Amino acid sequence: MNNSPDTVLPAAGEVPAPGEGKRGADGHLGYLLRQAAHVHRQRVEAVLGDLHLTSAQFAALVMLEAYPSQSGAELARLALLTPQTMSTIIANLLKGGLVARRPHAVHGRIQQIALTKQGAARLTAAKARVYGLEPALLAGLSPDEERIIRHWLAGVAAGAQ
């Protein structure tokens, strides 16, 4: 924590801007991760708006493309969402013609979700926009720093299990 005489603290009751005070480099690491994720999600929502996709729908479609024919429950785990939220997302994606359901070949009660051609096309457009945000996230970082951050984030996620 930086308590040097040069540190500018907000007046009592005054909330610092993002990136300042406890919302900045001196802040709790978990909060900083949450704050950064929130800002990134807002940016993702903004670029997906006219494609009529939310960030959660985008995550579901990306996971379906990477891991085809998942059940709703497994898709929820992959997309880091609750099964209830995923159920709503799947219903909306079905209405939009972006995914289809089919019974599992062995376990008939399990419904597998798959991208449709329309879903794959929409995902391609969405990925170009969302992945286009990454250079701004990485601005000022060297390739080695980017690699370190990616490995660190993946390690944090792996340790959560």
Image: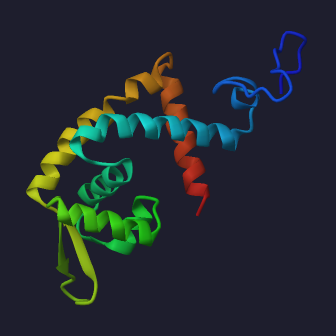
Name above or below for residue 41 compared with residue 18: below
In the image, residue 135 lies at what x, y percent?
Answer: 39, 24
Q: Residue furthest top?
A: 6
Name above or below for residue 102 compared with residue 125: below
Q: Is residue 4 left or right of residue 150?
A: right
The front one of 27 and 105 is 27
The front one of 52 and 30 is 52
Q: Residue at x 38, y 53 (%)?
A: 56
Q: How is the image coloured?
A: rainbow
Q: Quadrant of the N terminus?
A: top right
Q: Quadrant of the C terminus?
A: bottom right
The front one of 6 and 155 is 6
Name above or below for residue 103 compared with residue 25: below
Determine which quarter of the picture holds residue 74. bottom left
In the image, residue 108 lies at what x, y percent?
Answer: 22, 90
Q: Residue furthest left?
A: 117
Q: Residue at x 50, y 15 (%)?
A: 140
Name above or below for residue 112 compared with residue 15: below
In the image, residue 22 lies at what x, y percent?
Answer: 75, 31
Q: Please tell me how many numbered marks the rendered image carries.
A: 0
The front one of 32 and 17 is 17
Q: Residue at x 18, y 43 (%)?
A: 124
In the image, residue 33 lies at what x, y percent?
Answer: 61, 40
Determine which quarter of the picture holds residue 16. top right
Q: Residue at x 28, y 61 (%)?
A: 67
